[in-house]
Image (tube, helix red, strand yellow):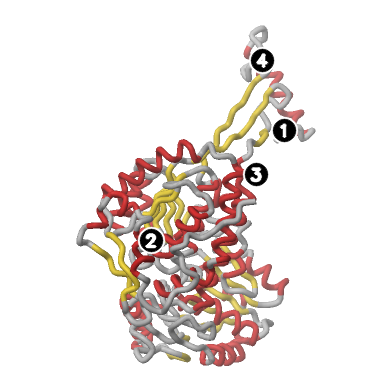
Amino acid sequence: MFAPKCSTFLPDRLLEGPLPDDLAAELRALTVNTATGSVDTEKRHNVENPWDGTIVGWVGIGTTDDVAHAFRRAREVQKTWRETPFDQRKRILTRFHDLVLKKRDLLLDIIQLETGKDRASAFDEVMDVANNARYYANAAEKLMRPARRTAGIPVLGKAREYRSPKGVVGQITPWNYPLTLGISDALAAIAAGNTVVAKPDSDTPFCSLICVQLLKDAGLPDDVIQIVTGQGRVVGSAIADACDYLMFTGSTKTGQRLGEQVGRRLVGFSAELGGKNPMIITGDADARRAASCAVNACFSNSGQLCVSIERIYVVQDMYDDFVSAFIAEVNRMKLGAGFDWSVTMGSLVSKEQLATVESFVDDAREKGARILAGGRARPDLGPCFYEPTVVEGVSDDMRLKRDEVFGPVVYVEKVNTVDDALARANDTNYGLNASVVGPSDTAWNIARRVEAGTVNINDGYAAAWSTVDAPLGGVKDSGMSRRHGAEGLLKYTESHTIVEMQGMPVSGPRFLSRKLYAAIMGRLLGVGQKLRLLK
């Protein structure tokens, strides 16, 4: 029995400061930038800790040549990797799952150092990566197994559907969930027999690099997953120009541009994009339960989550009780930096993100909205901290009404009925995630009418996100295709249909006239329908 062991250079924990020089060097050595030598130029990108602005480490700024090198290696390696038996792929992903859990403290530390988020939000990422590794380890072979299909003429025809990997998958990921978005989608891609060339966000590269090392420790061959660090407009664009399929997570605007780029080459594309996610609270909901649910839904990861709730519609009979309980919950939250589990909300990722959040709140305040909680930056805690903020009285002329904040800001609105709440919830160009809080029967009836890719009942987002056996993604301007579930793997494959006719062709035997054959087939099709012999 293989017992996975971590590389000796990976420590169990990190300090709240810069990475050790030797560790940073070992991780940079995993990048394509190092393989090509481009990392040795003077062009570097410093990774800053949002808590205090200190430098965590640095990575190289890649070029189009780096990307080209990665794809040459990826295409060569993919010829072998696609032939690797499923049981071997399963063992690798299972070992990786075990190593992720074994090294969870290290992973939590690096997530926090790169993003500034609280530790519980960081653990969400560790759990997601482990869940995806386990799921696709167990599901890949079954999902890609040749499948019998019903031939056009069932008795005389034999049909089979086969699946093969796309080839080299390109992946471009954001900073907000650098571990889960940096590796979880790639796990499905490699489980299907693809290789991957990935660009993590420049500000959060070390999470992906540690995962690549853990995969190598689990037995993954070299270059099955390759990391190129650098700017999106250079490295990301080059990946989009070279890949056989592109997986992107980020803004709707960037997703539209990349979709057009790969579409010109008739290459497949999957995107999880922006959201302005609603929560509906019914008139017969439990106010305390709803308030607790809303806090997690709105302020996990400091609200920097595509599926975060940014607007809450409360049926009037429940409004006062809910708002009172919600504000009390928000005021009890503990902001802070560091590895302390008692901190309930960490920092925003950057000063730029802080400025964006401030602009939304200031605009609403200046136009007459009421700040019920928060509404202030907290420089006393660090350069990028902002209080969890609840706003009331948001009007159509405020940016907060329809635009995604991507920060710890939510507005509450009183509605007369559930139908009013649904109308407001669906009145958006987005459709990523939603939440309904209330008694089960009532909530299920409402959830089916919400125009969103995922709807959580009595939960904000985590229930759907953690259900890796079901698809996750958006409708409208919130994206296309899905991660998780069968689609999360099959999107990285091509389907091939092979059909054999035995005895005679579909066009009929040569001894029958076309007219007579058509008459016979017309009668048989009718009988087949009535007897339910045909699909």
Report whether residue 256 is seen. no
Residue type at tag 3: Lys
Residue 265 has which mark? none
Q: In this view, does 326 lie to the left or right of 31?
A: right
Residue 343 location in percent, x, y? 50, 85
Residue 27 has which mark? 2
Q: Is disc 3 surrounded by few (<14), some (14 to 19) or many (20+) residues within 10 Å?
A: few
| Inter-mark Cα distance, 1 to 4 | 19 Å
Q: Could you tell me which residue is drawn at 50 percent across and 49 percent down?
A: 220
First in sequence: mark 2 vs mark 3 = 2
| Inter-mark Cα distance, 2 to 1 | 57 Å
Residue 169 location in percent, x, y? 43, 47
Front disc: 2 or 1:
2
Residue 142 has which mark? 3
Residue type at tag 1: Leu
Residue type at tag 2: Leu
